[in-house]
Structures are given as C-alpha cells and as structure tokens.
C-alpha cells in the first residue's frame, strides 16, 4: 500500500479513536444531549449536532494546520525534522502505545467549559452548538492529547502534510459524534446501549492500536536508531 494512503488512513483512525475515547465520548454525548434539551424539534437537534460536529472538526483542523505549518515553515527546523523525524518517531510511537495500554499514566483532566460559557452558547440557539463543539475540542484529555500531539502531528510532519492529515483527522473525530447526534435526534432510549457498546469497542480498539504503535515504534528504533 502507498505510504501516504496508509498515513491518511491512520490519521482517520486516530480521529475516530480520539472521538470514542472515554472523556471525549462522554463530553460529546453530554453536549449533544444538552443541546437537544434546549431546541424544540428533532430536526433542530439534528442540525445542532451537525454544527457541534463541525465546531470540533474545525478546531482540530486549525490546530493541526497551525502547528504543522509552523514547524515546516522554519527552514532549519524543517530540515532537521526531515532528516531525523523517522529517528524520533520510534520512541514517540512506543511511548504513545504504552500510554494507550495504560502502562504510563498522566494525572491531568480536561478543563471543561464553565456553566456561564454553556449559557452564553445557549443564547445563540442552534448556532451555539458550533461554539460548544469548538470549546469542548480545546479541552484535551490525556488520551486525546496523546493521540493528537503524540501521533497525528508527527505523522503530518513526516509526510509534510499541513492541511490534508489534520483535515482527515478532523473528519475522523466527527464521524462518531455525528452518529450520536442522529441517535439523540431520534430519541434517547438507544443512547445508553450505544454508549456501552462504543465504550467496549473503544477499549479493545485502544489496546490493539497501542500494541501496533509499540511494534511499529520498535521497528523504527531498530531501523533508524540501532
């Protein structure tokens, strides 16, 4: 398979895994449910979910573009990364994989958003959903931070992809949220069952991804370091 296509598929998978990780998943469902209680019809709930999804996706896209473009725009830094990125990628992947497997733990939590900010977003009605998505996306949890800063950014830098990789990652984060927005618009009875199933899937998906990261990281270490 073409390395760039494989990298694009990896970026999409990282986005999906970010979105279904426990903290972002709970935040997404809470936000969409919050929106659903404050708009009248299922149709409005559905469009609010779309705007919330777009707000999250746009946040990740902007952050990714700014960070990657900034790193690649400095000639000396760009040349250094192009020369040594594969060397750094091995240890980074091993560390992220260990973190995903729970072998390394970080004790910090997402800052969340205040009740006043929620009320301010509520004043904008449906359009406030986009603001909530933007703000919640900035509240990184340990797992989402590891996937975004520890996996996506090195991947985008390695392939010199300022826009495409962050865009694909943003789309990946949007897919599960969009699915839950549809469920909320149809009714809340199936939300609990869907949440439990996704939580179980996320646990195994995170473990498998962690193992793959460690294996690939060891391969990079053997080839480019040792």
Image (cartoon, helix red, strand yellow):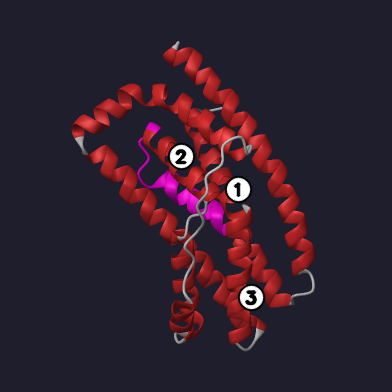
C-alpha distance separating marks 1 and 2: 14 Å
Q: Magenta span covers which residues? A: 158-175
Label 1 residue SS: helix
Q: To which residue does mark 2 refer? A: 150
Please name which of the two marks, 1 or 2, marks the residue nearer to the observer.
2
Neighbourhood count class around disc 2 (C-alpha, 10 Å): few under 14, some 14–19, many 20 upward: some
Res. 175 in view: no
Residue 41: which disc?
Answer: none
- For mark 1, what is the residue? 17
As drawn, the residue found furthest toward the left would be: 75
Q: Position of residue 180 (x, y in %)?
A: 66, 66
- Separation of disc 3 and disc 1 at Cα? 21 Å
* Residue 95, magenta (yes or no): no
Task: Report the number of discs.
Answer: 3
Q: Residue beneath label 3, please?
A: 33
Q: Residue at x 31, y 29 (%)?
A: 81
Residue at 77% x, 55% y is: 197
Side of 42 where 155 appears, left or right: left
Residue placed farthest to the top in the image?
226
In three-dimensional space, the C-alpha distance between marks 2 and 3, rounded to whole angstroms, equals: 30 Å
Q: Is any part of residue 149 visible from this angle?
A: yes
Viewer-nearest residue: 102 or 67:
102
Q: Name the quadrant containing residue 226.
A: top left
Q: Is residue 225 above or below residue 12?
A: above
Q: Residues within 10 Å of mark 1 (few under 14, many from 20)?
A: many
- Where residue 135 sits: x, y (%)? 44, 67
Q: Is residue 216 above or below residue 32?
A: above
At a point 58% along the width and 72% down the height, the residue shown is: 31
Q: Are marks 3 and 1 in contact (CB under 8 Å)?
A: no
- From the viewer's side, name the closer residue of 67 and 186: 67
Q: Earlier in the sequence, mark 3 or mark 1?
A: 1
């Amino acid at each position: 398979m073409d390395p760039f296509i494989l990298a694009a598929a990896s970026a999409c998978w990282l986005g999906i895994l970010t979105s279904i990780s426990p903290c972002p998943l709970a935040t997404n469902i809470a936000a969409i449910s919050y929106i659903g209680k404050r708009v009248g019809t299922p149709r409005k709930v559905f469009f609010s979910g779309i705007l919330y999804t777009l707000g999250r996706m746009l946040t990740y896209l902007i952050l990714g573009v700014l960070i990657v473009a900034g790193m690649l725009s400095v000639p000396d830094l760009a040349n250094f990364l192009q020369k040594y990125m594969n060397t750094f990628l091995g240890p980074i992947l091993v560390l992220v994989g260990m973190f995903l497997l729970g072998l390394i733990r970080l004790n910090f939590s997402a800052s969340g958003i205040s009740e006043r900010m929620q009320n301010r977003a509520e004043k904008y009605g449906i359009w406030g959903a986009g603001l909530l998505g933007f703000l919640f996306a900035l509240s990184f949890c340990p797992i989402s931070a590891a996937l975004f800063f520890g996996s996506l950014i090195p991947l985008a830098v390695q392939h010199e992809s300022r826009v495409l990789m962050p865009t694909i990652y943003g789309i990946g984060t949007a897919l599960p949220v969009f699915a839950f927005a549809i469920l909320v618009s149809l009714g809340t009875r199936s939300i609990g069952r869907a949440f439990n199933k996704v939580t179980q899937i996320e646990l195994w998906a995170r473990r498998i991804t962690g193992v793959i990261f460690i294996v690939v990281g060891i391969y990079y270490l053997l080839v480019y370091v040792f």
